């Protein structure tokens, strides 16, 4: 996998490569990120870091973001602290559980090597 | 000893779809069905209802049992549930009455009690996770305090012949683990097996969320016959779980739906802490082995913690939500103007000006908190949420939104509002030696 961005990279929303589900425990949100193709696990491990996710959510996530990798299952679990305006019991937000956080993460755009993208869309 | 025990997931929350549970019982060839009725704040709400003279369990429990008991009892499927809520004995009396009226007079019902630790919390005044300070520093009255209890008492009740086991705040996955402990004779030291059984419970505790619920995306990700979403079955052996669903129902079970649920509400995957065991799934394996059949294995177990998690419920005032809709040219600008005017008007009311208040424009960025900009929508809803200490103030907070119909920007319509009392929960940990859950058969 190319480690640095090249001119041949394509900008692709994560939605095209993975699906996600989010849950809550108090003010903590978690997002399970599941690549459609197991082969994309390495690419996403490189291009969707905890720091990327923290930056992406900006003010919506007050605490730290930790990414747990599950290499045998080829999935990731992002844990977002202080992320739900106090949590379901105290939040004034519309989606107080943060059920849509996973779908929002899938709108994040990442750089994907063009040859990789061609292989991914063929299968 | 059976080679495989079939446990169904018949409910993911207090008001889950009964049709799914009934189809599961009729077609699933189950040995047991678990009914998870409790979310984090449910017990505080039920305790409050009980203290106000109502019942401490689902208000429509008799109606639910009238539909669920016949397909279960007629097939010998045993029910394991936390539907006892804040009053397991009271819930058991309702189930008994329904069973008798349906001529299931031999049905044996057990309750598991001892999760209510309100007196202990008042006495110990434990430090709360959220504040880092003792409970008493909140300066609020305790509505409820319940410890998450494990599976062994429920397993003992099943061993004594119970057909229905009603617990209060049993940990969700323990509802599946309990029958497995009984059937396989697992001990407290069989950590890997307890961990496997716990993960079986985790996978089916939200019922349809592992069989295609929360998965369809309206485009690429299709779920067949989602309107008839089938509820899940865990076929659990001593080394692996197979997740499937009742035949002839809608939904899908594959690697993707199972992994989605596996990660749901998960923290550290190397330490999924429960009262009975701490599963580690970092070396787990998943395999699609047939149509709507997925095998999950390779779960390791670490010892259980020496403390039990306790959720303490306290009053959190009234949540007042009021809304007004705008459409057409500059719909978003008019909603923003409306919000600005409302802020000024609410600010002039001294009893409201200091209250937690939030304004959102639904249709633009009320939920979409991050991500690239998208096209402007043609109709939006301004939503005003205020948390007020009493109902009267809450009502006043909604009146200004109502008044925007005449006294605000063009086109304001579709006004609506709701006011509801809320509770919030705080977590703490109490030495498990001080908490003694116990089961008993009820007459």
Image (cartoon, coloured by chain):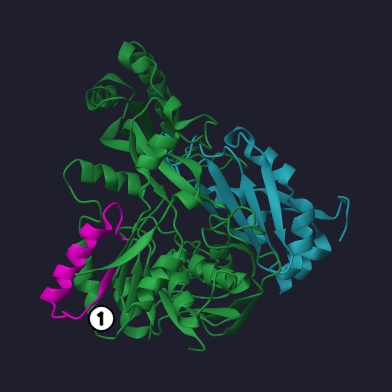
Q: Is residue A22 above or below residue B318?
A: below
Q: Is residue B127 above or below residue B442?
A: above
Q: Is residue B430 toward the left or the right of residue B319 in the image?
A: right
- Residue drawn at x 65%, y 67% is A36
Image quarter of residue B411? top left
Q: Is residue B48 toward the left or the right of residue B282 in the image?
A: left
The letter of the cyan chain is A
Residue B278 visible from this viewpoint: yes
Image quarter of residue B323? top left
Check disc 1 and report its element: helix, strand or loop: helix
Q: Position of residue B211 (x, y in %)?
A: 47, 71
Chain B in the picture: what colour? green
Q: Is residue B91 magenta?
A: yes
Residue B349 visible from this viewpoint: no
First to last magenta residue range: B83-110
- Residue drawn at x 43%, y 75% is B179
- Residue drawn at x 31%, y 75% is B162
Instruction: Quickly name the residue at label 1.
Output: B73
Q: Is residue B443 magenta?
A: no
């Amino acid at each position: 996998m190319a480690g640095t961005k090249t001119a041949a990279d394509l900008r692709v929303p994560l939605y095209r490569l993975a699906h996600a589900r989010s849950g809550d425990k108090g003010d903590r949100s978690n997002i399970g990120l599941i690549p459609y193709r197991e082969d994309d696990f390495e690419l996403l491990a490189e291009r969707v870091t905890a720091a990327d996710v923290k930056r992406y959510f900006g003010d919506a996530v007050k605490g730290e973001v930790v990414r747990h990798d599950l290499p045998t299952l080829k999935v990731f679990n992002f844990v977002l602290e202080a992320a739900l305006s106090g949590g379901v019991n105290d939040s004034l937000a519309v989606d107080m559980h943060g059920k849509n956080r996973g779908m929002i993460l899938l709108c994040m755009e990442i750089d994907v090597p063009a040859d990789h993208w061609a292989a991914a869309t063929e299968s | 000893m059976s080679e495989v025990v079939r446990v169904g997931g018949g409910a993911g929350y207090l008001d889950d779809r009964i049709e799914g549970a009934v189809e599961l019982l009729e077609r699933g060839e189950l040995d047991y069905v678990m009914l998870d009725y409790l979310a984090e704040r449910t017990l505080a709400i039920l305790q409050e209802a009980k203290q106000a003279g109502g019942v401490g369990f689902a208000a429509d429990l008799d109606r639910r049992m009238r539909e669920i008991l016949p397909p279960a009892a007629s097939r010998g499927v045993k029910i394991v549930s936390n539907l006892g809520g804040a009053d397991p004995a009271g819930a058991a009396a309702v189930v008994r009455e329904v069973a008798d009226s349906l001529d299931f007079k031999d049905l044996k019902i057990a309750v598991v009690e001892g999760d209510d630790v309100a007196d202990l919390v008042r006495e110990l005044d434990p430090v709360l996770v959220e504040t880092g300070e003792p409970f008493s520093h909140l300066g609020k009255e305790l509505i409820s305090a319940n410890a998450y209890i494990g599976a062994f008492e429920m397993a003992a009740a099943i061993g004594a012949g119970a057909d229905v086991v009603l617990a209060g705040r049993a940990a969700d996955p323990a509802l599946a683990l309990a029958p497995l402990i009984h059937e396989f004779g697992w001990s407290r030291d069989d950590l890997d097996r307890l961990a496997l059984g716990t993960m079986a419970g985790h996978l089916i505790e939200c019922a349809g969320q592992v069989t295609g619920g929360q998965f369809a995306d309206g485009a690429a990700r299709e779920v067949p016959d989602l309107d008839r979403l089938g509820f899940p079955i865990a076929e659990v052996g001593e080394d692996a779980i197979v997740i499937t669903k009742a035949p002839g129902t809608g939904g899908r079970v594959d690697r993707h739906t199972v992994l989605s649920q596996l990660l749901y509400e998960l923290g550290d995957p190397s330490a999924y802490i429960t009262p009975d065991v701490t599963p580690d799934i970092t070396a787990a394996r998943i395999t699609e082995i047939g149509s709507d059949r997925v095998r999950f294995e390779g779960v390791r177990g670490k010892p259980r913690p020496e403390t039990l998690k306790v959720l303490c419920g306290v009053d959190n005032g009234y949540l007042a939500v009021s809304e007004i809709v705008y459409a057409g040219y500059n719909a978003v600008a008019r909603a923003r103007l409306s919000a600005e005017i409302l802020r000024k008007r609410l600010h002039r009311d001294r009893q409201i000006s200091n209250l937690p208040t939030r304004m959102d424009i639904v249709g633009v960025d009320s939920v979409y908190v991050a991500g690239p900009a998208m096209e402007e929508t043609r109709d939006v809803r301004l939503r005003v949420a205020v948390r007020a200490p009493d109902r009267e103030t809450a009502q006043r907070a909604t009146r200004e939104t109502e008044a925007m119909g005449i006294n605000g920007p063009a086109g304001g319509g579709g006004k609506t509002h709701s006011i509801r009392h809320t509770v919030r929960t705080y977590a703490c940990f109490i030495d498990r030696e001080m908490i003694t859950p116990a089961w008993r058969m009820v007459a």
